[in-house]
Image (cartoon, helix red, strand yellow):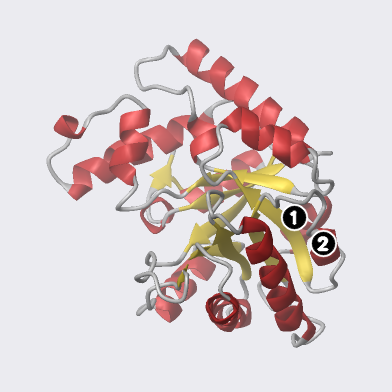
Amino acid sequence: MANMNNEQLNRMQSGKGFIAALDQSGGSTPKALAQYGIQESSFSNDEEMYTLVHEMRTRIIKSPAFDSEYILGAILFENTMDRKIDGLWTADYLWEKKQIVPFLKVDKGLAELTNGVQLMKPIPNLDELLTRAVERNVFGTKMRSAIKEANAAGIREVVEQQFAVGIQIFKKGLIPIIEPEVDIYSADKTKSEEILKEEILKQLNALDTDVKVMLKLSIPTVNDFYSELMSNQNVVRVVALSGGYSREDANDRLAQNHGLIASFSRALSEGLSADQSDNDFNNTLKQTIKAIYDASIT
């Protein structure tokens, strides 16, 4: 792993805090902007939309509340990686100015529902994207699949696809965050999680000892259900998504899972708006970050 940053790896392995997910992409960007108080009438094309969302993310990242005391890493969307903050590439700004480890979302969204799951769509230019991520000093990646039903064949397929792409990513010198999200509203969520854990363990046991991955999972129905994954030699860290729970609910559930840390996106920007004064914006963000941090260090 020639270009693996050991300082960043140590921080992700043993640091206290959580990962901020700032990676809403094409489809979810208008929703993220609307939540922030910027309506679709404020932009007329994708470029204008991405400029506005970059301004929002820049405001979050530059806020004094966005502090490495609480935040270990941040997940960026490709468009954010390719933009700058104060003359530095976003990933460099995060690490050099904030000591926050940069990740990149690499998936292209979800395929249609089959066997109770949604696999990732093919990622045609993945190799080129990973090369660019390495050049931009990104540490790791993130990619999401979705599990809607406790269908053993479907869940196996999701996990196999995630690990196959994950190994490709690791070989490029990046740490993959493998994210097979179980739908929190699924009628058989507990059963899905049992099958999922079994399939993840199968894949982990097949890895060479030097291969490192991270896992991003829905907060399990049974507390501490993923502790076995946390102690696996190939796993850098297990992080949790908020998955549609309100921030308060997500924090409560997270706090009951020891060693599980947050990687929240919507729950992180809840309550922030474009027309807030910097003072109000920073205070709101500070309270949010502190609450998510507290739930992550249990």
- Of residues 294 and 72, the one drawn nearer to the viewer in this rendering: 294
Answer left or right for 163 relative to 70: left
Residue 257 location (% of width, % of height): 80, 45
- Of residues 81 and 92, the one drawn nearer to the viewer in this rendering: 81
User: Measuring 70% from the left and 82% from the top, which residue is drawn there?
Assistant: 203
State the residue position of label 2. Answer: 230
Does residue 289 lie above or below 104 as drawn? above
- Of residues 91 and 268, the one drawn nearer to the viewer in this rendering: 268
Does residue 260 lie above or below 285 as drawn? below
Answer left or right for 243 relative to 201: left
User: Measuring 77% from the left and 64% from the top, which residue is drawn there?
Assistant: 236
Mark 1: few/some/many CA within 10 Å (<14, 14-19, 20+) = many
Q: CA distance from mark 2 to mark 1?
A: 13 Å
Q: Amino acid at mark 1?
A: Met
Report the mark closest to the observer, 2 or 1: 2
State the residue position of label 1. Answer: 12
Residue 178 location (% of width, % of height): 61, 67
Describe the element under mark 1 as helix, strand or loop: helix
Residue 77 location (% of width, % of height): 43, 54
Residue 4 location (% of width, % of height): 69, 70
